[in-house]
Image: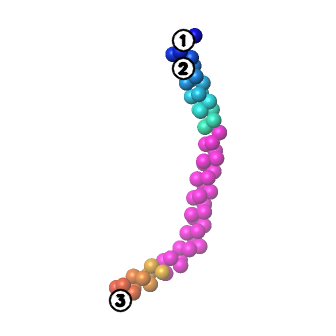
Amino acid sequence: MDAPKVLARRLRTAWGDALDDEAGDVPGWVLITLMTAGLVVVIWALAGPALAQLFEQAISRVSGL
């Protein structure tokens, strides 16, 4: 067999395998993204008032008001 034909067949096979492997990862990445967003919302809801108060205290100390 020709070396270029063998190389082309190997590249097509490797490319096809890579595409097949990645197809199952999309739902996992979507789930990770949604869970991360949910954690950010929960942490922000719990820590938001304390952070706002801390910011207001720092501004009042700096400005002297």
Reply above or below: 58 against 42: below
Question: Please, what is the three-letter code of the amino acid marked with disc 2?
Answer: Leu
Reply above or below: 15 against 2: below
Number of other residues with Cα within 10 Å of mark 1, as a class: few under 14, some 14 to 19, many 20 or more: few
Residue 63, image x, y percentages: 34, 85
Q: Report if residue 47 lies within the magenta region.
A: yes
Question: Please, what is the three-letter code of the amino acid marked with disc 1?
Answer: Asp
Q: CA distance from mark 1 to mark 2?
A: 9 Å
Q: Earlier in the sequence, mark 3 or mark 2?
A: 2
Q: CA distance from mark 3 to mark 2?
A: 74 Å
Reply above or below: 23 against 5: below
What are the residue bounds of the magenta stretch? 24-53
Is the image coloured rainbow, by chain, by secondary structure, or in one colour?
rainbow
Helix, strand or loop status at disc 3: loop
For the residues bearing labels 1 and 3, Cβ distance under 8 angstroms: no
- Residue at 61%, 42% in the rendered image: 26
Which residue is the extreme one toward the bottom? Answer: 64
Residue 49, image x, y percentages: 53, 77
Q: CA distance from mark 1 to mark 3?
A: 82 Å
Which residue, given by chain and number where applicable, does mark 2 sit on?
7
Question: Please, what is the three-letter code of the amino acid marked with disc 3?
Answer: Gly
Which residue, given by chain and number where applicable, does mark 1 sit on?
2
Which residue, given by chain and number where applicable, does mark 3 sit on?
64
- Quadrant of the rendering where the N terminus is positioned: top right
Q: 2 or 52, which is in the foreground? A: 2
Q: Earlier in the sequence, mark 1 or mark 3?
A: 1
Which residue is the extreme one toward the left? Answer: 63
Helix, strand or loop status at disc 2: helix
Query: Which mark, residue 22?
Result: none
- Residue at 50%, 76% in the rendered image: 51
